[in-house]
Image (cartoon, helix red, strand yellow):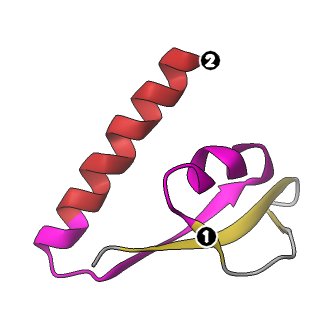
Amino acid sequence: MRVAAATGSRILNALETKARRHGARKIVLNARDNALEFYRKRGVTTLLATLKTLFGVIRHVRMAKSLS
């Protein structure tokens, strides 16, 4: 699991860098309920406390992170 988290961190960092280069001040994402802790550890906060079901079966939470 550590390898997956390290890879996920590198991908998230790369996406944040690219977003900043394009002038974004914030990123917003839908996180699977089993990935919430991963994102929280990286400074992403929950926007909506309720879980939404996407694609009819996958529970997600809307999250965001300031890039300033």
Mark 1 highlights which residue?
45
Name which of mark 1 and mark 2 comes first in the sequence.
2
Q: Is residue 43 magenta?
A: yes
The quadrant holding residue 25 is: bottom left
Question: Are there few (<14), some (14-19), or many (20+) residues within 10 Å of tag 1?
Answer: some
What's the residue type where badge 2 is placed? Met
Q: Does residue 23 appear to the left or right of 30 in the view shown?
A: left
* Mark 1 or 2: the one toward you: 1
* Residue located at (70% from left, 52% from top): 36
Check residue 59 in the rendering and tell me which mark sits there, or answer none: none
**In which quadrant of the rendered image does the C terminus lie?**
bottom left
Residue that appears at 54% across and 64% down? 44
Instruction: Determine which quarter of the picture holds residue 59.
Output: bottom right
From the viewer's perspective, is residue 14 above or below residue 43?
Answer: above
Q: Is residue 28 left or right of residue 61?
A: left
Three-letter amino acid code at disc 1? Thr
The N terminus - image quarter: top right
Q: Dot 1 lies on which element?
A: strand
The tally of labels here is 2
- Is 14 placed above or below 68 here? above
- Image coordinates for residue 27, horizontal then vertical, percent: 41, 73
Residue 35: x, y in percent?
A: 69, 45
Residue 1 - label? 2
Q: Is residue 48 left or right of residue 22?
A: right
Which range is magenta?
Answer: 19-44
Q: Is residue 36 above or below residue 56?
A: above
Mark 2 Cα shell of 10 Å, populated few (<14), some (14-19), many (≥20): few
Give the Cα distance between marks 1 and 2.
Answer: 22 Å
In what element is the residue under mark 2? loop
Tell me whether the residue at label 1 lies in contact with that at label 2, contact meaning CB atoms closer than 8 angstroms. no
Q: Nearer the viewer, residue 56 or 31?
A: 31
